[in-house]
Amino acid sequence: MSVSVLRHRDFLLYLAARVFSTLAAQMMNVAVGWQVYALTGSVTDLGLIGLAQFAPFLLLVLPAGQVADRYDRRVVINLCFGLQTAVALLLLGFTHSGLTAVWPVFAALALAGCARAFMMPASQAIVMNLVPTERFAQATALSSSSFHVAVIAGPVLGGLLYLAGPQVVYALVAALFAAAGLLMLPVRTRQTTQRAPAGGRSILEGFRFVRSRPVVLGAISLDLFAVLFGGAVALLPVYARDVLHVGPTGLGLLRTAPALGAACTSIVLAFRPITRHVGRWMFGGVALFGVATVVFGLSTHLALSVAALALTGVGDMVSVYIRHLLVQLETPDAIRGRVSSVNAVFIGASNELGEFESGLTAGWFGLVPSVVLGGLATLGVAVAWMALFPVLRRMNGFPTAADAPPAPTPATAPDALPGANRPSNVGAKVDSSCAAK
């Protein structure tokens, strides 16, 4: 894959900011998870970590999509970095003062959830504004690879630094978020903003757009339910201490494993992109995710647990790759923020709400049974979606960017959305920019 996309200064600055912020977020996750479990010893409280972030995220992400379409996405992202810096400083202050209750941590994480609500639609939509269209697939592959490298390094670094105390972790997290904000200041975008009415109908435009495309709806909902039932990230501190008998560094390795599998997969996809049998690849990835989750749930050895989690990352990356290209290539820039916010709802639900579900089911059924049942449920979801979305199962290739319809106006009726009454182009062509990665 050519790295000529790195010659675009604005994309390079954005990429560096994304790496810094991802490192910071992963380090904070390790520190918060270990600190909360050390204070309470409750798996339910680990689930509440996810809920504290997801609740404000769910409330704000749809309006955030409209904000990403109406205003400069660079400014939106920078404001989010500022709020995340403040969250890290709050956690640092709580810890320094001698934290004895967990509710201040949950309150700070709720602010982080607000920042993520506005960050996700803007950051998903901005890449198309930073590079030429013909470089978008390369930019996507490089962004994904660098993101997962940061996800790999962040938990390990966070686990190592936690040995010196959570204050050290939170201080560095604040510095990294602040540095990301400074990197975004000189970035310039080629965004086509439209000052559409700020009413509820305009906010829901992304849902109507997604609903009109069964392939996109099937892909993102498949990912939602697969990760919702099969995710076990929230329970990793319990597995690390009570099942595998490892410390913070071992927890960092467990958190790193899915990202390692995803990073290796993204590199392979950069050189050998999926161009045929797209639907089969997606369902195969979900099935791999489910099987690997079952293996992880039953494992009592660190090496096997790390390998199983790495395979969950492989399966999840295939799903993310397909879904992201589908969403971005099908959507016009004027509503890309709102459609990205819908995608963000599905991603957020599968991650944060999935963590809450994991904590609850572990409390009800026990640690190992809850993870194994979650993996089996993921396999059941894959089978059900193959029946519910046959067009997704038969999908052969990606649409081209030229297939994206014009943006609907705010007054557009749901039944009149572009593509609502026309056959899908998905599978008819393969995007040339994707094939060139």
Image (cartoon, rainbow, N blue to C red):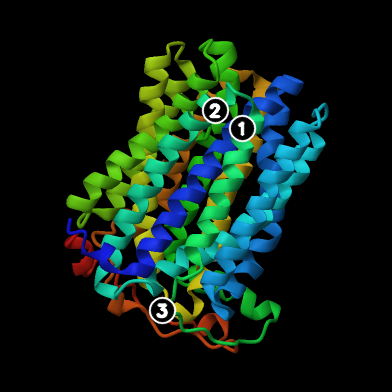
Image location of residue 367, percent across then percent down: 60, 19
Q: Secondary structure at mark 1?
A: helix
Q: Nearer the viewer, residue 76 or 219?
A: 76
Marker disc for residue 419: 3
User: In whole angstroms, how far apart are the C-alphas of marks 1 and 3?
Assistant: 52 Å
**Left or right position of 417 against 401:** right
The image quarter in which residue 109 lies = top right
Q: Secondary structure at mark 2?
A: helix
* Residue name at image x 45 percent, y 54 percent: 18
Mark 1 Cα-neighbour bin, 10 Å: few <14, some 14–19, many ≥20: some
The image quarter in which residue 45 lies = top right
* Residue name at image x 40 percent, y 23 percent: 306
User: In whole angstroms, how far apart are the C-alphas of marks 1 and 2?
Assistant: 7 Å
Mark 2 Cα-neighbour bin, 10 Å: few <14, some 14–19, many ≥20: many
- The residue that label 1 is drawn on is 168
- The residue that label 2 is drawn on is 161
